[in-house]
Amino acid sequence: MILKNCTALIDGKLTENILIEFENDKIIRAEAVEKDAEIEEDSVDMGGMIVSPGFIDQHVHGAVGYDFMDGSEEAITSILEALAREGVTSILAATTTGTNDDIVNALDAIKDFDNAHGVEILGIHLEGPYLSPEAPGAHRKELLAKPTVESFRTYQNEAGGKISMITLAVEEDEGFELTKYLRQHGVVVSIGHSNASYDQTLEAIEAGCQCATHCYNAMKGLHHRDAGVVGAALLTKGFKAELIVDRIHVSDPAICVFDKMKSSQDKILITDAMRAKGLCSGTYDLGGQQVYSNGIEVRTKEGALAGSVLTMDRALKNYMDVTGRRLEEVLLMMTKNPAELQQVYDRKGSISVGKDADLVVLDKELKVQMTICRGKVVYSTNHENNSC
């Protein structure tokens, strides 16, 4: 397949008159051509629309009524189909704190799922049960557990080695034993749901922690006597941090602080979306408890935020609106940066020859027009269907 007349993100810059050709699942050509150059007859004229590497959401729990914790092929298939509509081509499937049986059931289902031609599950993001009871967010306190290498190895065996990222309250990790073990075995450690001090956070980073889970949310905040997890996350160069840019989880001024403090390569946009995404207002299950969505935000009965209904394309527009950043700058936060953290930049995260043909086509209003996963069109506005 050949896409011509693209305004494509190439080497970090949006460049006009780009031709992209892919065969099977790989990009075999990505280059600038003369506007009136003769192109093969079977090429598709993109009319100058924006073509970006497909979005990578490294923190998503569910959508359209399903959650990865449901542990079924139907749930996983439905979630991935929904995510394609927002330009997502790769994800980490995020779990939630639950009973041991519930977590194992989810790990087994994700491990065995084969989606050869759709949105790719790069790995599993284990969020819970190794969280702080002082910062549980919407996770059930009674099901939290102390982190140990032995218990993690049990989960990893159940997952067939596919746990590639873990959210960890590092202050609960005695001697940073698990943190060090995970780093040695190539699993990304992300501090989150944590009451760690600034100094404890720096010690964890030294031990191997590489990222902050949904920065600002469910972590010790910035204080003039203890800068906390937030202060360490914002000040440490080379340390990546996730951000939920629904303009509810984090205020606009706080988004701007994040933007000014973190370097361009250390920002990662996520959704942290749950099963209510893509559906109307109503009551939904999250980790065995009832939460309510009004179609804009999701909260527990106590009023705590419980994931989001954010889409990745909306996160893109929100970040640009709040910070004034250029489109090409923000696209990197959703493509290259997570690909590098997840150690898949050799095949994901940029439009380059030899890489997977994972692409999203956006119009001038930044609405998703087409999503291509490994060379296959998995979503097009020609087949759009709205649920509400």
Image: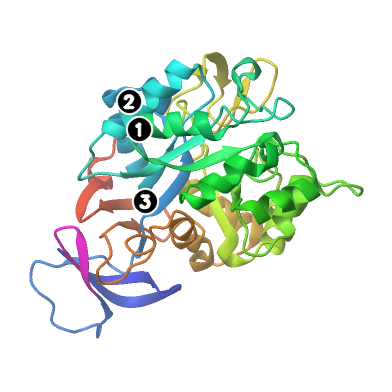
Q: Residue at x 67, y 62 (%)?
A: 262
Kind of residue indicated by mark 1:
Ile
Tell me if residue 66 can be seen: no
State which region is magenta.
Answer: 21-29
Where is residue 304? Give x, y as percent: 68, 25
Q: Is residue 185 magenta?
A: no
Residue on which the image places disc 2: 75
Residue 368's disc number: 3
Residue placed farthest to the left in the image? 41
Q: Label 3's element?
A: strand
Judge the density around disc 3: few (<14), some (14-19), many (≥20) Cα neighbours within 10 Å: many
Judge the density around disc 2: few (<14), some (14-19), many (≥20) Cα neighbours within 10 Å: many
Q: CA distance from mark 3 to mark 2?
A: 23 Å
Where is residue 7? Give x, y as percent: 35, 71
**Mark found first going from the N terminus, 1 or 3:** 1
Q: CA distance from mark 1 to mark 3?
A: 17 Å
Residue on which the image places disc 1: 79
- Observer-side mark, 3 or 2, equals 2
| Residue 105 appears left or right of 245 | left
